[in-house]
């Protein structure tokens, strides 16, 4: 059985053309990308050891090996961070003491106070699973009519992959789907998520599972939305990590004057106030 670490290394190896690394073309191959021999040579490890890592038979490679593989694959800084994270969780899950706990849903009072100070701005508190734990009235006005906040426990990941309206609301739906799938790997309890295995995965199907297995580090560019009222919005995102809570405070800012004017119009529509979802 493979591991997140092994799957990521294999996916990156398959996506790299040998000539991009200055390696000679070796003729017709049965599979695309970089051969194990080439990667092992560049990383200074044996092919047999690389095979064990990719297949999940070695789950505790040293930091030196992880860094050597990152160099050999010419990973970007964000990809290197993800590789180190996958190495950590792969090793942790080998431990008999590993007991992943669900992330807390309670939002600290000081964080809620911060949200109030951001009104009428657009902001949410969320976690890596996509749970919307609290939001400003400004966020509610921007998402009104989309169905995102219609449930008692709104979840961005579920919405993106299972609600047809999401494909219209998020102009760059594929990019947003990549982001939501990638963030599941950063969740502290991925292995024991009943909702992921019993509810989300069957409904989302290959749109989700394919992205989980690819481990594509998302670009997280300008967020483009098409509001049901006919407004096209372009938003910048600033994220404040709340590591003690395994949560994030995300603030959305208009990327241009047209968006700012559209948001002002949406604010004038009836909408709710700050809401914390327990």
Image (cartoon, helix red, strand yellow):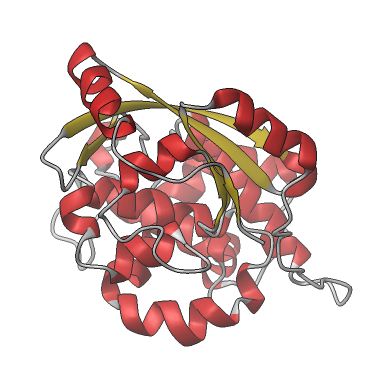
Q: Which residue extends farthest left?
A: 230
Vertical placement of residue 145 versus 254, above or below: below
Quarter of the image with the N terminus in it: bottom right
For the point 35% across and 41% down, which residue is it? 141
Quarter of the image with the C terminus in it: bottom right
For the point 19% across and 62% down, which residue is it? 29
Relative to 59, 154 lies left or right? left
Relative to 68, 77 lies left or right? left
In this rendered view, identify the residue nearer to me: 206 or 213.
206
Relative to 64, 235 lies left or right? left
In this rendered view, identify the residue nearer to me: 273 or 74.
273
Find residue 61 and report its horizontal and vertical position in percent. 70, 55
Q: Which residue extends farthest right?
A: 97
Find residue 84 and report its horizontal and vertical position in percent. 64, 45
For the point 32% across and 21% down, which residue is it? 254
The image quadrant of residue 214 is bottom left
Numbered marks: total: 0
Vertical placement of residue 119 versus 60, above or below: above
Find residue 57 and report its horizontal and vertical position in percent. 63, 74
Vertical placement of residue 150 versus 24, above or below: below
Q: Which residue extends farthest top?
A: 257
Is residue 26 among what the camera can see? no
The image quadrant of residue 237 is top left
Is residue 57 among what the camera can see? yes
In this rendered view, identify the residue nearer to me: 18 or 172.
172
For the point 51% across and 68% down, which residue is it? 152
């Amino acid at each position: 059985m493979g591991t997140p670490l092994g799957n990521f290394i294999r996916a990156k190896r398959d996506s790299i053309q040998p000539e991009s690394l200055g390696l000679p073309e070796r003729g017709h191959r049965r599979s695309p990308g970089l051969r194990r021999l080439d990667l092992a040579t560049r990383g200074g490890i044996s092919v047999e050891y690389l095979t064990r890592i990719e297949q999940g038979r070695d789950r505790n490679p040293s930091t030196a090996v992880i860094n050597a593989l990152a160099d050999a694959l010419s990973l970007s800084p964000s990809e290197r961070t993800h590789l180190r994270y996958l190495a950590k969780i792969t090793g942790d899950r080998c431990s008999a003491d590993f007991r992943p706990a669900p992330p807390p849903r309670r939002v600290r009072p000081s964080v809620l106070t911060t949200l109030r100070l951001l009104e009428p701005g657009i902001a949410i508190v969320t976690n890596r699973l996509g749970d919307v734990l609290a939001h400003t009235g400004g966020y509610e006005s921007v998402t009104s009519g989309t169905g995102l906040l219609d449930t008692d426990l709104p979840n961005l990941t579920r919405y993106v992959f299972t609600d047809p309206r999401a494909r219209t609301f998020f102009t760059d739906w594929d990019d947003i789907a990549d982001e939501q799938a990638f963030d599941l790997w950063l969740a502290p309890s991925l292995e024991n998520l009943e909702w992921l295995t019993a509810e989300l995965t069957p409904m989302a199907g290959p749109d989700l599972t394919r992205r989980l297995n690819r481990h594509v580090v998302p670009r997280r560019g300008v967020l483009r939305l098409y509001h049901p009222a006919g407004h096209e919005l372009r938003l910048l995102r600033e994220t404040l990590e709340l590591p003690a809570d395994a949560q994030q405070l995300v603030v959305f800012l208009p990327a241009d004057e047209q968006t700012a004017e559209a948001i002002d119009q949406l604010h004038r529509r009836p909408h709710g106030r700050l809401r914390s979802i327990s």
